[in-house]
Amino acid sequence: RRPPSPRMIRFIDALQDKILHGGLKHVRWPRGKGKSTWVKIAIIWAALYGHKKLMVVVEKVKGMAYVVVEECWKRIYLSPRISVDFPEFAIPMKDVELASQRMRSQTYKGQPTYMKQDIVSFCYFRLPVLDGYPNTGSIIAYRGADQTLRGLNIDSARPDFFFIDDPQTDEDARNPATVAKIEENIAGAVLGSGQTDERISAVMASTPIEPDDVSERFADPKLHPEWETETETFVVSWGDESMREAYISKLEEAAACPSNEAQRKKELQEVAHRFYIENRAEIEFGAEMMDDGDFDPASEVSAYQHALWLYHNMKPKKFNSEYQMKPTRSQNVYHITPQIVSSRVNGVAAGVVPAVCSRGALTFVDVNGEAGLRWETGGFGAQRVVATLAYGQYPREGVALFPPDLPESARPSYLADALRTVATTILSQPLVDESGEPVMVSGICFDGGWMTSTVSTVVRELNALAGKELCAWSKGFAAAGRGSYSIRHHDMAAKLGNGPAKDNPSGLKAGEECHLWETPYGVFLAYNSDYWKDVSQTSYFAQPLKPSSSSFWGTSPYAHFKFAQEVCNEALIGKTTSPQYGTVWQWKKDPSKMNHFGDTHAGLLAYGAIRGFFDPIASMISATSIQNIQKRKVRYVFDV
């Protein structure tokens, strides 16, 4: 066995410090580099010296956690060195030969030793308790990351150390809903399960798989400042690129050789190996490795050669994730910026509906308890053309929706007054078409996902005053889990069709990734908020007033910058298709910034779709258009 590398020694020191003094350590190392092995050694050390009394091992599934704990248990039982140094553990364990029945009857000085292995209910192993040996009696429990961790308590003992090892599967990492569940489970357990009089200790060892997965989120100091994250890459710095590519091309040539030409394949592999040896100085110039001893001396000459072999065999995407800690985005992911969004101005004066937006005007109102109400009115035209005509927020920026001293019981009436005020503002907008004729807002859609009863009451009241169905109210389903709309609601929408049908006596209809839905409160517009957020953001890549475009009034590319910032504050970092969930979107949001106008614009487009103002998906802009505008960089700001 090789001695630990200098980087590993630093990790071991940090691990010991966290166990002795508390604190949360997150280690992101390449796969197979020994981080989990050393944590298991640390668990055994903490148990033998009595530093921790209830340690919990968390793996992606419970069975894997059991394997880790059983290995620690058997190592204590079988190790000759531990038998000599810690007879208070070895003698009782060997006496019962780890037989559960014999454990129950074992005593020391007339007292039970309480040794136990519970693999059915509470899932833990307890070392023997011996009078006069204060270091005895530690419990090592195990759980799966998908199990409830918070509130764990075994015989009045609460966890004082968590070891969380790679808590996500590949499928978990691709599903934002599962990522959020695991993240919440871990955060709640670690911060909420410890003793009140001492600092909790925890070590998480993870490897990223996808952008914004569990590993990525716990490594983000804005999201989890309580965790101290250490990230190490297998290749610290790369050598000469051209020589690296030349060597990899020779490896690829050997790999492409048919399996029935074994001799030829072997010869090509030898050619590649000789090329590396002969050009090693050039290939490795400037390269630095995490551990210079990490290679197989029988077939390789250096850790860098081993890294290039892995890079070739695993392919760049997987290698970058698992060895370089840099998960790459899918090819179909775009990068939207506030500069792009705010530059989409159409030159039409404020309050004027562009001629191409002849289908009418609609408004969507986003309702949020902390940020208040955001609203946007848009004009709709053929081929998915949308022009923002007005937008606003209530109360004004920087003022909370509810005064800090407002009683909880007064909030419904306070919100109702706010909704009425916003509705009055929207309906009094002086909108005209390009010929000067007045244009009325054809409908208002209120977000009903929060304080639903109050919103529904105000909607009914406004409709009664208008004498027609002016206001609808909505709820997106992202909160129930990303991708959940297609699973829970899309089949229902398909049955409804586009008009009255046998299964649809009320005449409710379905639209593009949305449908009307009857509830005890009234009618919802149910829509796939992930899908419509995607449509909303990509619409800003098109030229103003052209097919599939969204744009603002005026000529200044900076006038709508704050609105644009909120549109862009959720960035699409992954978009995949899963057999279980269908299309799954992965978004990353800066929690310190707002995204409410982004939700408002997405809701406005979905409302337009259900009202028939927004054409079907066939006229969506192509990926080529998106790529072209991104290549133009700064120029798009002025190209209006």
Image (cartoon, grey):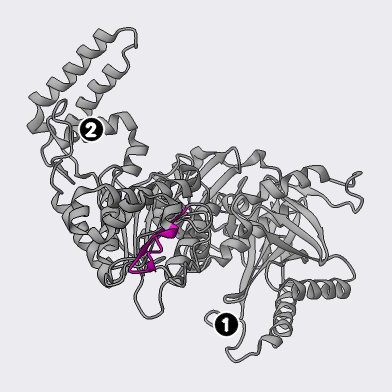
Compared to residue 260, the image places residue 473 above or below, namely below
Q: Percent x, y for residue 425?
A: 71, 77
Q: Is residue 343 visible?
A: no
The residue most toward the front is: 110
Q: Check disc 2 and report its element: helix, strand or loop.
A: helix
Which one is in front, 197 or 350? Answer: 197
The residue most toward the bottom is: 405
Q: Is residue 168 visible?
A: yes
Please say whether residue 342 is one of the residues in the magenta stretch.
no
**Circle 1 sits on which residue?**
400
The numbered disc on residue 497 is: none
N-term mark: 2 or 1? 2
Left or right position of 522 against 387 = right
| Span colored in magenta | 104-118
Q: Percent x, y for residue 474?
A: 72, 62
The part of the image, by quadrant, that contains residue 277 is: top left
Compared to residue 269, the image places residue 245 above or below, namely below
Which one is in front, 80 or 109? Answer: 109
Compared to residue 343, the image places residue 208 above or below, namely above
- Seen at 92% across and 44% down, the residue is 502
Left or right position of 400 against 144 = right
- Seen at 24% across and 65% down, the residue is 49
**Circle 2 sits on which residue?**
308
Q: Percent x, y for residue 111?
A: 38, 69
Please say whether residue 115 is one of the residues in the magenta stretch.
yes
Which one is in front, 358 or 333? Answer: 333
Q: Check disc 1 and report its element: helix, strand or loop.
A: loop
Left or right position of 424 against 19 = right
Name the amino acid type tagged 2.
Leu
Q: Residues within 10 Å of mark 2 (few under 14, many from 20)?
A: some
- Seen at 13% across and 32% down, the residue is 283
Compared to residue 160, the image places residue 76 above or below, namely above
